[in-house]
Amino acid sequence: MFITSVLMILILLVILHFSTKIPISVGKINLLSISIYRDFGVLTALALAFWIDSSMANEHYIMSQIPKDSMKLALYASFLFMFFFLFYGYFLNIGFNSIRNKMPKANESFFEKLTILWLFILIFFVGIMYFKNPPVLTQIFQGATAMDISVARSEVGGNAFFKIIRNTWVPLTSYTLLYFYLKNKKIFIFFVLSVLLAVICSVWSGAKASLASLILGYLGVYIIAKENLKFNSFKVLAYVIFFFMFILFMYYITTLNNGTTFSNILITATYRFFVQAAGVSYAFYMYPTFFDFKYFSGISNFISGLSSTKFSSVYGDLIDYAAPEFADISGALSSFAAGDAYGLFGWWGILIGPFFAAFFYYMFYCFSVQGNAKILFIGMYGLYFGNAFLASSFYSFIWPVGLFISIAPFLLFYIISCISKTG
């Protein structure tokens, strides 16, 4: 299945390039190509190929529950999901490109000042957050084990407002300031301050990949801001190694008090990395044989309330079934969007669902590459470039309340800056 997975990745890259003329080389990686390389390619296709071909699946407490046929079905369905993602993206790309230069022009200098002011407001909130929900990693110095860290991480994530600050507003602000710094070196001190704040917030909960994802987001913004920039293969390879070393370092930090070896850390990291494909394959095993399709009851509390049903996500239900002892800690068996879409709407989710994901990915790409609203979307571009959202869930695309909350401050800055320019 490894060869099949590689062929799928190559086919999708070719379709992306010839349908939209978007670069697909690793040296000019962008939001759309990384969704194929990382979200579908590594975290889904190659991960599923690993479990299908390897006997190690029989030793894993979750993967051993899933028949190989369900894994294969998940692989083909995920490829179909990405095919329609690119199909809808072709038309969305035309539409967004036709309007991006017609968006209102903002006073960029004023937007920059508002972003810097917002940075200090965030610093104030993070200061409050320190006393309300202290950083999880500080517990390591008190002898906390990896399980203690996992439990504490689930507890510190309970405050929704502070979670938005840590996971979205702080990195969005820092990515936006990186864009302004590349144009105006005078704001260097503010950019550095935003980076320090973003690094602190990224390691706050003790999550393994947060810091690496943050740094990857900076790379995405840097590449898109430097329009003609192209990395050679050596630099790309070095960055990939650097990325994984950061993740291994976080595993080491969170297991300091476990007495584990580097070999065990490496094995655990490998399992956790490839188990990202567990949710999507589990969905095709469980639905509809064991679970009924969730439809709108699996999208949000509000929509499920309209039909007098209780909200629960597809991947949340799956972890309750697959590993109930970890359900309270992990929350959900997050995986590629195809499994979530299938658990919600069956095969209609695979056929129509990609439109919702493509809408946001192509919007962030088109408006960040060029256009009058670049300053509004550049932060979201970095956030989506750094994080594998397509390999995490689907329902957030069809009910994007969190996305609108994330971009709300910058949308306000954009509107004010547009008024300032016209005034």
Image (cartoon, grey):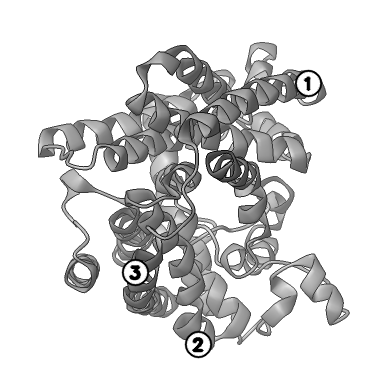
Question: In the image, 122: left or right of 341?
Answer: right
Query: In terms of image quadrants, where is residue 292?
Result: bottom right
Please name the residue that numbered disc 2 is placed on.
347
Helix, strand, or loop for circle 1?
helix
Give the side of residue 300 with respect to residue 352, left or right. Answer: right
* Mark closest to the chain's N terminus, 3 or 2: 3
Q: Nearer the viewer, mark 3 or mark 1?
A: 3
**Disc number for residue 93:** 3
Cα distance between the residues tagged 3 and 1: 42 Å
Q: Quadrant of the C terminus?
A: top right
Of residues 27 and 394, the one nearer the viewer is 27
Classify residue 305 by image quadrant. bottom right
**What's the residue type where badge 1 is placed?**
Ile
Residue 406, image x, y percentages: 62, 47
> Is residue 247 depicted above or below 23 in this figure?
above
How many neighbours does mark 3 have within 10 angstroms: few (below 14), some (14-19), or many (20 or more)?
many
Q: Secondary structure at mark 2?
A: helix
Amino acid, disc 3: Asn
Q: Is residue 254 left or right of residue 371?
A: right
Whole-angstrom CA distance, mark 3 to mark 2, is 25 Å
- Image quadrant of residue 289? bottom right
Task: Give the camera-side residue of 185 and 133.
Answer: 185
The kind of residue on which mark 2 rests is Trp
Q: Earlier in the sequence, mark 3 or mark 1?
A: 3
Q: Where's residue 89, x and y in %?
A: 36, 72
Residue under label 1: 128
Q: How many marks?
A: 3
Q: Are there few (<14), some (14-19), or many (20+) residues within 10 Å of tag 1? A: few
Q: Is residue 292 visible?
A: yes
